[in-house]
Amino acid sequence: MSEVIVTVRGEHETRVAPEEAVAHLSVRAESSERGAVVEKMSALTAPLRDDLAARKLAGGVADWSSQRVSIWANRPWNNEGKQLALVHYGSVEVTATFTDIAALSWWISEVSERDGVQIDGVTWRLTPDSARLTEAAVAAQAVRVAVERANAYAAALGLTTVTALEIADLGLLTHAAPESATSPKMMRAMAMDSAGGGPALDFQPEDIVIRAGVEARFSAR
């Protein structure tokens, strides 16, 4: 039999326990005066920043950040359709990456009771180094699956020599839809309320699923 071109897809996935938890918070305030909003926001966020800075030095927090205060104003309407006096609003987003999950649980419970603080969610993930190594291992296994599949096709045709010609992420050889072409892909778990989309204080997240897929073209003789 003459040369046969074999095009296959190889896929693999693994599940890994999260190593870090990223807490997402927002601090909000409102007042009839702009200056009062700025002062209130400063008073609300300063203890959070000091606490997180201390936790980072102690090692329980890998990193944290807070955006600059956003200030805006509008004139609300009452139930009678009358426009009321101008109201000023302030908001700042705070994120903190915890490596100590037990400390995160206590911290979330404590700060959620503070005035003006809202818990927006907790994202679970791997450390950057673990994510890179795991994604590389999963991608390599996807390639091995493609090779095994190509050899199986060749053997079914009575061919014994299989040579790789091309290998690519999903979609680059077969022009699949753009959303299916990313490889590898890491799915991060986020603690959210299934009923309404709000935050849920769930500190037993599911494993993170890391998937990889490749397309490969082989020459079989």
Image (cartoon, helix red, strand yellow):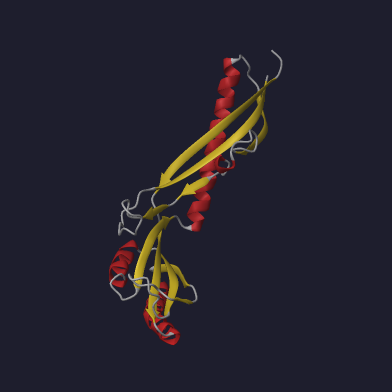
Q: Quadrant of residue 112?
A: bottom left
Which residue does the image show at 64% across and 38% down from the upper left?
A: 172
Q: Is 47 above or below relative to 151?
A: below
Please tell me whether residue 13 is drawn above or below residue 196 in the rendered image: above
Q: How many marks?
A: 0
Q: In the current view of this chain or complex, which residue is farthest to the right?
A: 2
On the question of residue 55 being in view, the answer is no
- Quarter of the rendering containing residue 33: bottom left
Could you say which quadrant of the image residue 125 lies in?
bottom left
Q: Quadrant of the N terminus?
A: top right
**Residue toward you, 7 or 145:** 7
User: Does 134 sit left or right of 194 as displayed?
Assistant: right
Pick the residue in front: 221 or 86: 86
Residue at x 37%, y 79% (from the top left corner): 44
Which quarter of the rendered picture does the C terminus lie within? top right
Query: Measuring 41% from the left and 44% from the top, which residue is drawn there?
Result: 15
Percent position of residue 182, x then y: 57, 44
